[in-house]
Amino acid sequence: MDKRKWLLLGAMMASSLAWAGDVSVRWEKPDDYTDIRPTNESREGFRDRVCKELGKVFEGYGKKLPDGVKLEITVLDLDLAGDVRPMMHGNNDVRIVKDIYWPRMTINYVLKDASGKVLSEATKEEIKDMNFLMASHIPTGNTSLFYEEKMLDDWFRNKQRSGAFPKLPS
């Protein structure tokens, strides 16, 4: 290949890597969420860690959206997988994970294009994974909340498949 073709190929690859939308997350009244209870750390520290980890999951979806697209998410409620039970002996509680304690989240979202036009929106959308123990889970290492991460990944992927969220150009 001559020099011009290499430059063109490099420019095309660089432009495809530059595609990225923007995702912002707001956590509304996290102290009132259904279940954001810690087992062996402070309530405030656990809440902050959960919001930070799941916020990064949401923000990562920006890489899967076209340039200029903005997704604004407001988390209204969160119910983590499992149920926290007090231990009889010792200081730590324990989170019991059974199929009846599936992860759930309620959100509002607005998806806008670069000009600010609303492409998609939902109010009080329920995200849940009732079969969270049936599927294979390969932890990504991005979060310690892998059931919730998988639930959100499935939700985002389904939004793109249905056309509610745009995909990156092929």
Image: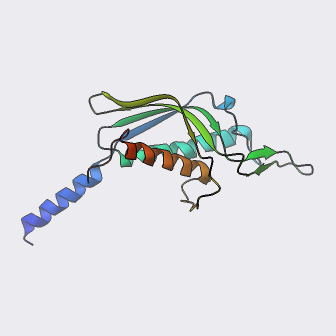
Give the residue at x 92% y 51%. 89
Residue 156, x across and y down, in percent:
45, 45
- Quarter occupied by residue 142: bottom right
Question: Is the image coloured rainbow, by chain, by secondary structure, or in one colour?
Answer: rainbow
- Quarter occupied by residue 160: top left
Residue 126, x across and y down, in percent:
56, 35
Residue 96, x across and y down, in percent:
77, 51
- The count of marks equals 0
Above-or-below relation of 128 to 14: above
Residue 117, x across and y down, in percent:
30, 27
Foreground residue among 167 and 40: 167
Foreground residue among 112 and 102: 102
In this rendering, position of residue 12 left or right of residue 161: left
Above-or-below relation of 109 to 139: above
Residue at the far bottom: name it. Answer: 1
Give the residue at x 52% y 42%. 55
Q: Could you tell me which quadrant the C terminus lies in? A: bottom left
In this rendering, position of residue 167 left or right of residue 137: left
Give the residue at x 9% y 72%. 1
In this rendering, position of residue 44 left or right of residue 56: right
Residue at the far right: name it. Answer: 89
